[in-house]
Amino acid sequence: MVLLGHEQHGVPPEALRLVHQVVEIPMVGTRLSLTVAVAGSLVAYRLAGLL
């Protein structure tokens, strides 16, 4: 299961307590977050083994 956080608020603390592993997408530049759609697309691409 993949849990994606809200662009502004992230994943709620009560949900974080239930997960086995937390990963972040490394970013360069001034943007503080990706949209959930973009982040989800990157995760799906990586999980598909295409990177």
Image: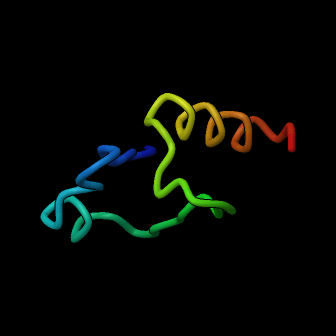
Apparent side of residue 6 relative to residue 25 in the rendered image (left or right): left
Q: Residue 46 at what x, y percent from top left?
A: 73, 43
Q: Residue furthest right?
A: 51
Residue under the image location 86 percent in, 44 percent down: 51
Residue under the image location 60 percent in, 58 percent down: 25
Apparent side of residue 18 relative to residue 30 in the rendered image (left or right): left
**Residue 47 higher or lower than 22, as above or below:** above
Q: Nearer the viewer, residue 10 or 28?
A: 28
Which corner quadrant holds the N terminus? top left
Residue under the image location 54 percent in, 63 percent down: 24
Apparent side of residue 31 relative to residue 10 in the rendered image (left or right): right
Q: Residue furthest left?
A: 14
**Residue 11 higher or lower than 36, as above or below:** below
Q: Residue furthest front?
A: 30
- How are the colours assigned in the image? rainbow
Q: Nearer the viewer, residue 23 or 6?
A: 6
Q: Residue 39 at what x, y percent from top left?
A: 54, 40
The quarter of the displayed image where residue 11 is located: bottom left
Q: How many marks?
A: 0
Apparent side of residue 45 relative to residue 1 in the rendered image (left or right): right
The quarter of the displayed image where residue 28 is located: bottom right
Q: Residue 26 at what x, y percent from top left?
A: 65, 64
Q: Nearer the viewer, residue 25 or 50?
A: 25
Residue under the image location 53 percent in, 65 percent down: 23
